């Protein structure tokens, strides 16, 4: 067993963050102090994906419990929290289209069956779990109302108002990455079936999309190159980045006028350039809202790709 004087090894919590390419597991001690993480590949399933993926996750947890350096066993697991890329209501996953998870599935029941009846289980939408993680761990109660916008390959938005996650009747409240913001004739098709959603014009894929469309090319494959060139002052890239973040600021202006959060956190790969990005967003936000001079702070999220599993265990 590892030298771990400061850890509470009497019980453990496990956070699981399900993504399109990997499933990440975060192991936490009895005081929810992060210990270590591991990941398994997300296998795409043609049929019964919900059952198969649940099985993959529970197998990975069982295997970890059989062999690890901290004395984690099934009977010492006090809670498991999941972050799933789809709508979740009342601890039930309704669907997760990116991983072909097509129908409602009782992950709580299955987890208790496999790991133990006493295990406390919570299930969240991944963007909401990430928002909870930043809210509880990064901001530590300093702000009561926040919005996290994760600008990864896709775009995830989680909103917490007065300490409460906004989930809505069927789990789509806050899913503003699918708000239509591009009404042009050649607006791009989104995974959700609509065209011109925020996700098609911002985030990793979206920034590249905007660049390629503006200059009628296919040379931009991801956001990082466009952002880097924009930062170096290259005009075409800067214009594309400004246009993309202008769409994002439109959505932020809506969130601001509906909820007035104190802080907007920007996460995901696009956030790596820090204030270069947040300054552009703020500039465009100020062009859109005139009714107040009190704007939310726009800051960079801290937990990076750990936010999902941190948030998933935060309420256990
Ligand atoms: Zn969409």
Image (cartoon, rainbow, N blue to C red):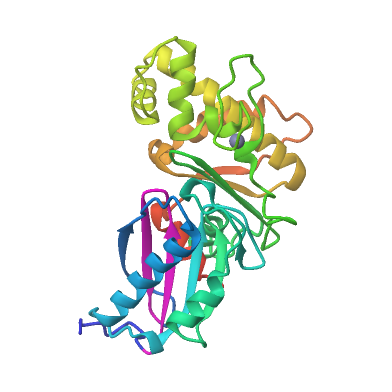
On screen, residue 247 versus residue 32, left or right, reads right
Return the residue nearer the eye: 276 or 39.
39
> Any magenta on residue 227?
no
Q: Residue at the location (53% across, 27% down)?
A: 201
Q: Which residues are magenta?
A: 10-29
Q: Residue at the location (59% across, 65% down)?
A: 141
The main secondary structure of the magenta stretch is strand
- The residue sitting at the top extreme is 216
- Can I make out residue 285 in this image? yes
> Any magenta on residue 27?
yes
Q: Residue at the location (44% across, 41% down)?
A: 152
Q: Residue at the location (63% across, 23% down)?
A: 182
User: Ligand 1 is located in which of the four quadrants?
Assistant: top right
Rendered location of residue 286, percent (x, y): 66, 29
On screen, residue 239 versus residue 142, left or right, reads left
Q: Is residue 107 above or below residue 283?
A: below
Q: Which quadrant is home to the N terminus?
A: bottom left
Rendered location of residue 65, percent (x, y): 31, 80
On screen, residue 119 versus residue 182, left or right, reads left
Rendered location of residue 297, percent (x, y): 59, 44
């Amino acid at each position: 067993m590892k030298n771990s004087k400061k850890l509470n090894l009497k019980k453990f919590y496990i956070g699981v963050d399900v993504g399109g390419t990997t499933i990440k597991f975060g192991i936490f001690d009895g005081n929810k102090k992060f210990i270590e993480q591991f990941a398994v590949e997300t296998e795409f399933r043609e049929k019964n994906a919900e059952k198969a993926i649940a099985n993959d996750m529970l197998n990975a947890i069982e295997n970890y419990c059989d062999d690890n350096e901290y004395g984690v066993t099934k009977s010492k697991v006090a809670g498991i929290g999941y972050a799933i890329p789809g709508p979740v209501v009342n601890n039930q996953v309704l669907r997760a289209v990116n991983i072909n998870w097509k129908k409602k599935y009782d992950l709580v029941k299955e987890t208790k069956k496999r790991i133990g009846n006493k295990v406390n289980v919570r299930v969240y939408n991944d963007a909401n779990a990430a928002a909870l993680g930043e809210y509880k761990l990064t901001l530590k109660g300093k702000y009561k109302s926040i919005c996290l916008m994760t600008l990864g390959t896709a775009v995830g938005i989680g909103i917490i108002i007065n300490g409460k996650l906004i989930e809505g009747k069927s789990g789509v409240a806050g899913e503003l990455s699918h708000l239509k913001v591009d009404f042009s004739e050649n607006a791009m098709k989104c995974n959700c079936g609509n065209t011109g959603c925020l996700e098609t014009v911002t985030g990793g894929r979206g920034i590249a999309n905007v660049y390629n469309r503006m200059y009628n090319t296919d040379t931009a494959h991801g956001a990082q190159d466009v952002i880097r060139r924009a930062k170096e002052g290259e005009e075409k890239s800067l214009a594309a980045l400004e246009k993309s973040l202008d769409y994002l600021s439109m959505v932020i202006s809506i969130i601001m006028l509906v909820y007035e959060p104190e802080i907007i956190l920007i996460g995901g790969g696009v956030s790596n350039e820090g204030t270069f990005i947040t300054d552009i967003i703020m500039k465009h936000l100020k062009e859109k809202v005139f009714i107040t001079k009190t704007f939310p702070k726009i800051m960079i999220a801290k937990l990076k790709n750990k936010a999902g599993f941190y948030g998933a265990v935060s309420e256990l």
